Amino acid sequence: MPECVASWLKYRDPTKVSQIQEIQNELIRVYENDFSKHNSKVNSGRIPMVFRSIVSQLARANGKFMYGAVREGGRARNFEEAIEWPVSAGMRNRVYNVSKVEHPLAAFDKLDPFKLFVFDTGLLKHMAGVDNSAILLKSDYHFKGPLTENCVLQQLRGQFEVEPRYFSDKNSEIDFVL
């Protein structure tokens, strides 16, 4: 069990939130330091850039990953490996868009439009600088949607053997399709 979850379960005390935040800060530092160990495989500077951009990527209206949002003028060829390695390592979740909601979904993957999520919703919340009162007390809080999607994705990935996809057209979006 992650240390921050164990801490919350042990204390269940909002005054202990600073301890949980310290643990989350340390986890993020550890992950970012781990990225630098893979410099021979991928330009290690690009991995943290992508990691840090996830919050702003998910806050966008459609949540679709945009290379130019990582770095101005960014292109797929600059960041493909910086995305693939952490996805393969389970540190990020990539959800592809499908052109049709039809079985088998993988046959209808559109490989360019995709969304990137953090593997842990608590870390995403921390990376976004969101405190619990914002989520619980503000009905119009914009980042609730991305946090909810991340949480639902975590649950779906743990429950089903297939990778979730999403479907969108000009007028609407289905967040997850199995």
Image (spheres, rainbow, N blue to C red):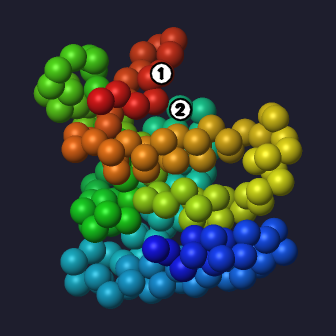
Query: Which residue is painted at 60% across and 33% down in the image?
Result: 61
Query: Which residue is painted at 32% across and 37% down in the image?
Result: 164
Residue situated in front as seen by the camera: 49 or 73: 49
Q: Position of residue 162 (x, y in %)?
A: 22, 40
| Residue 21 visible here | no
Looking at the image, residue 89 lies above or below residue 140: below
Name the amino acid type tagged 2: Asn
How many residues crowd around disc 2 within 10 Å: few (fewer than 14), some, or many (20 or more)?
few
Secondary structure beneath disc 2? loop
Please give the residue where the numbered disc 2 appears in the rendered image: 62
Residue situated in front as seen by the camera: 141 or 44: 141
Q: Position of residue 123 (x, y in %)?
A: 57, 65
Query: Which residue is painted at 33% across and 45% down in the image?
Result: 159
Could you tell whether 175 is left or right of 18 in the image?
left
Q: Residue furthest top?
A: 171
Please give the residue where the numbered disc 1 appears in the rendered image: 173
Callouts 2 and 1 close, C-beta under 8 Å: yes
| Residue 44 visible here | yes
Looking at the image, residue 87 lies above or below residue 59: below
Residue situated in front as seen by the camera: 49 or 163: 163
Q: Position of residue 90 (x, y in %)?
A: 32, 63
The mark nearer the N terminus, 2 or 1, is 2
Secondary structure beneath disc 1? strand
Name the amino acid type tagged 1: Glu
How many residues crowd around disc 1 within 10 Å: few (fewer than 14), some, or many (20 or more)?
few
Q: Residue furthest front?
A: 10
Label 2 and label 1: CA atoms lie apart by: 8 Å
Query: Which residue is painted at 72% across and 62% down in the image?
Result: 129
Which of the 4 image quadrants contains residue 128?
A: bottom right
Looking at the image, residue 12 lies above or below residue 128: below
Which dot, 2 or 1, sits closer to the camera?
A: 1
Which of the 4 image quadrants contains residue 80?
A: bottom left
